[in-house]
Image: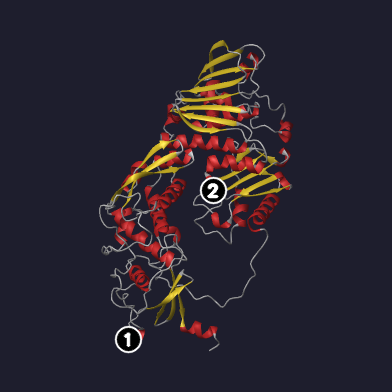
Amino acid sequence: MSNIHVLDEKTAGKIAAGEVIERPAGVLKELLENAVDAGAVSINIDIEGSGRDLIRVNDNGCGMSAEDLELCVLRHATSKIHSFGDLDTLHTFGFRGEALYSAAAVSRMTLTSCTGDGAGNRLELHAGKVVAKSPAPAIKGTTVEIRNLFYNVPARLKFLKSDAYERACLLKVIEESALANLTVGYRVHINGRAVYDLPAQTGPLEAAVKARAKQILGGEVSSTLLFKEFAELGLKLFVTPADKLVAVRDMQYVFVNRRPIDSKTVQQAIYKAYQNVRSKDRHPAFLVYLTINPADFDVNIHPQKRDIRFVNENKVFGFLMNAVGETVFSNARPVAVEMPAPAPAITLPPAAQPAAEKLFAPTPMETFAAACTPQPEPSPARAFAPKPHFMVKETEEPVEYVARAAAAPGAEPAPAAESPAAQPADLHAAGDPAWYHGPYHYLGQLQRSYLLFENPEGLVVIDQHAAQERVLFEHYLDAFDRRDVKVQKLLFPVHVDLPPSNAETLLSWADWLKTAGFELEPFSAHTVLVRTMPHMIRFKEDDMKAFIISLSQVVGDPSKSTESLKRKMVAMLACKKAIKAHDAISPAEAEALLENMKKCKDGMHCPHGRPCVAQLNMKQLDKLFGR
């Protein structure tokens, strides 16, 4: 007796749906592609219950006849191709005839459509089976209504994540479609609340892309985008300049013949162009529009058609790398200058020196906290930045971690450290970290960015921003781990505008962020309110907004580890609060910063892993002058 048999149509349909549709966002993507293929210039989208309760897409496209309405839900039924050879001339999104069939197999679906020639028609299906047919109003276009998604495959529901995360995925699909199809207008409602109203864009491409990008990516990013057009590959390129890179990768869009794709070839080519100016924690934002002969790439290699294969991957890589370089740098390169061998940075012993990537690794919180040496609370002192008196209700004096000298008016400044000749030449006093070769004598500030000290070995250079970042990072992280973050309520909540997908994702972390001192709540689809902040941070309003925007870009799925996010968030806080390059600093402040660095677990690296301190010894100095 044979053990091989043909699956029944119901089982095969559910399996096929799993290949095409992993989550509600997959359904929405297919429906939007069908609407655009139908020639729609206006699309209305309604979502309830993060897509599991309802996804409704209404368009004003060409519509379908009664006969086509019944055929469109059959497997491999399509109007896009007639033979395999048609794939070489394909100019539509859909072509396999699986979208409606797969969605119908795992939901209760209602299709309403009209060609504009006579009355419309309605078709109702449960689990892929037609249960009702009826006439419909003569309104040109098509409406697809998906209810109770995965109701007949409950195991699939277990793999869905939080409502906030699924809503963010749905919004991401809409944002991709809107950036790909500029001449189409999109109106979006989630749970009855208006989220997007994106009018169709007309006119020059550059203005149209930037106008839509402003609504989706935000004005801060869209206003910096550089635009350049190339005839080869029909490339229209929008990229951020080298000094305006962002904190995350989720502002990167690639469209091939208006199809949103994920392409390692394109991404790596762009990163290669930035390789000499990009630090590892900063990323380019970009929109890449390619118009290519369909025969020059294969889109049929991925079930969701997210990935493609170029016929000539190397050619595409090289061309894009050069195009981005030309756009960002205008082919100008600095003259190479031969420098003496650089002085080695002061380093910790190998066992104690953490690699940069380990800093944010999701290690147990207790391990990290135990390794940090607790710091005594410094005395109150004046902050580097002006107090945000217009927004903060002050209940106690702020805590500062690199203290200014609290001298009375007219008093003498605090004395600097004594010269090496006046102190014992003890390079490693008891309790000092291994890198500390004292005593140190403060010499001054170079370009208001680097602090210069003399020690018995020679010249010490400290990056003032990176060093204070480290001090603030460890102090706040210690308070966070001890659950001792003091909170300050704002007199007036700060309104922060965000792309709706970022706002949804950020608010999914609201409970966790409250433990970190930030109380957030929704105000509108585009806006969140900040009601509290950690007392030790004391942001000005603009700094608060910049921080929340940056934070919204790095948070992700709430089911992921909070440990990694905690370190990223604390590093961002420290970076925003630390004294910047080109800020003046007094001798007393410089010496206090050096003392606080001694108390850090790793006083030699900023939270992002970059060095804080370099030592130039006397032999190296003598060599520079041929002595």
- In x, y percent, where is residue 405? 31, 69
Q: Which amino acid type is marked by label 1?
A: Ala
- In x, y percent, where is residue 334? 63, 67
- The part of the image, by quadrant, that contains residue 311 is top right
- Indicate left or right for 22 with 228 as reference: left
Q: Which residue is mark 2?
A: 221
Visible in this render: residue 301? Answer: no
Task: Report the front residue among 106 and 252.
Answer: 252
Task: Report the front residue among 66 and 469.
Answer: 469
Visible in this render: residue 566? Answer: yes
Q: As displayed, is residue 303 above or below residue 494? A: above
Q: As displayed, is residue 555 above or below residue 277? A: above
Q: As displayed, is residue 92 above or below residue 617? A: above
Q: Residue at x 38, y 60 (%)?
A: 385
Q: Which residue is mark 1?
A: 422
Q: Which amino acid type is marked by label 2?
A: Val
Tag 1 near tag 2, CB within 8 Å? no
Q: Which mark is residue 505?
A: none
Q: How is the image coloured?
A: secondary structure
- In x, y percent, where is residue 139? 60, 16
Q: Residue at x 30, y 70 (%)?
A: 409
Judge the density around disc 2: few (<14), some (14-19), many (≥20) Cα neighbours within 10 Å. many
Q: CA distance from mark 1 to mark 2?
A: 54 Å
Q: As displayed, is residue 118 above or below residue 466? A: above
Does dot 1 land on a helix, a strand or a loop? helix
